[in-house]
Amino acid sequence: MKLEGHCAPEFDEVRKVFSFHFDKGLEVGAALAVYHRGKLVVDLAAGFRDRSSGEPYTRETLQPVFSVTKGITAIAANMLIDRGALDLDAPVSSYWPEFGAAGKREVPIRWLLTHQSGVLGLDQPVTQAQLLDWNYMTKRLAAQRPVWVPGSQHGYHSMTYGFLVGEIIRRASGRSTGRYVAEEIAGPLGADFFIGLSAKRNDRVAPVLFEQKPGQALGLPDSGPYANRTLNWISPPLKVSDVNREDVRTAELPAVNGIGNARSVARIFAATIDTTDGIRLLSSLGMNRARAEQWRGRDEVMGIENALGLGFLLPSEWCPLGGSGSYGTAGLGGSRGWAHPELSLAFGYTPNLCRLEHFARREAALSRAAVSCAQLLAESSLRCSSL
């Protein structure tokens, strides 16, 4: 197995873990990137784009990253909050009047970001073609009654998060989420990340591959009382393999269909905690507000403990990210993006082999190695400064 890219000597343990996963047959193709103190210290790729062509998986290969998209959408929303274009505690209906129907008039923007609105899905099914129609979906969701009293419970809004937060981004900025990300995040940073991929880039995308059950419906193996509510209103159901379809890739589904590479995911998260090549996405105040814990406890969709900031996952047993103080986003199959401000560390990982389980041991081991290396550097700096 040949590695492409580079790794700073201080982060060699990360390279070793990445290589080990290929040696043990846990990967087909993947890329990994780590930023430390604003510099790209790990930028690696290895393996193959698919199982048959022999085409190498490179650092430039684009990859569907499932719910990592939610974290990029959260960055966009928090940028608007940081800039004063969105009032976090204002009613959604003050920006999106139609949303005030069916008992939702006082729902604040905060509860869209924290998965507390209760708008988990629709009472009447939609076709897949309707799902890809933004105006149709936001109209239907605006009229939908929540499944719980808003704010009273919390549960992962697997698909609707993207439409709800995305429409607020559109109302506040005049731009779709995909366009906002392109113009305010990915473009300035020179990052290859897309919500709504142009057809001309489709040949750069590696297909999602499967360990088993390629026809399994999209979503985590959720077990909470509202698990079936999150996706059962799409007919026929979306399958994991549907992210390989061009129509799904080119639509804007800001909860699930982002496409990027590890370097770009890490770079975007690095720019939320510090200036990265002259670009900073969130102020220190905005970043700390975004990662402040809004709730922690049993997720009524996932059926396990979860924790949320303003649109970001916070460390929990099922998704440790970079440990205490970190915030980020987790994609089905193992893709990850997170930042740890105290360690000046940001992480991106994009595998093409989709492992359908809550606990992604590949990502967790890579994250632990990155954190360990950064902690050793911090301790070394502290010792030197005390001499």
Image: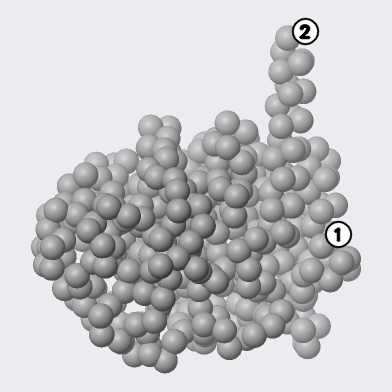
Residue 39 appears left or right of 197: right
Say above or below: 102 vs 39. Answer: below
Identify which residue is drawn at 44% across, 87% down: 237
First of labels 2, 1 by sequence position: 1
* Residue named by callout 2: 387
For label 1, the SS is helix
Say above or below: 199 vs 17. Answer: below
Residue 135 appears left or right of 68: left
**x%, y% of residue 301?**
43, 64
- Which picture quadrant has residue 201? bottom right
Residue 349 appears left or right of 314: right
- For label 2, the crowd category at 10 Å Cα-Cα, with few meaning under 14, some 14 to 19 and many 20 or more, is few
Q: Camera-side residue: 31 or 17?
A: 17
Q: Nearer the viewer, mark 2 or mark 1?
A: 1
Q: Camera-side residue: 245 or 4?
A: 245
What's under tag 1, amino acid-wise? Phe
Which label number is shown at residue 20? Answer: 1
**x%, y% of residue 65?**
56, 68
Q: Please, which residue is most extreme toward the top here?
A: 387
- For label 1, the crowd category at 10 Å Cα-Cα, with few meaning under 14, some 14 to 19 and many 20 or more, is some
- Which picture quadrant has residue 337? bottom right
For label 2, the SS is loop
- Which picture quadrant has residue 63? bottom right
**Quarter of the image containing the N terminus?**
bottom right
Q: Are marks 2 and 1 in contact (CB under 8 Å)?
A: no
**Quarter of the image containing the C terminus?**
top right
**x%, y% of residue 145?**
19, 70
Residue 47 appears left or right of 187: right
**x%, y% of residue 275?**
51, 37
Which label number is shown at residue 339? Answer: none
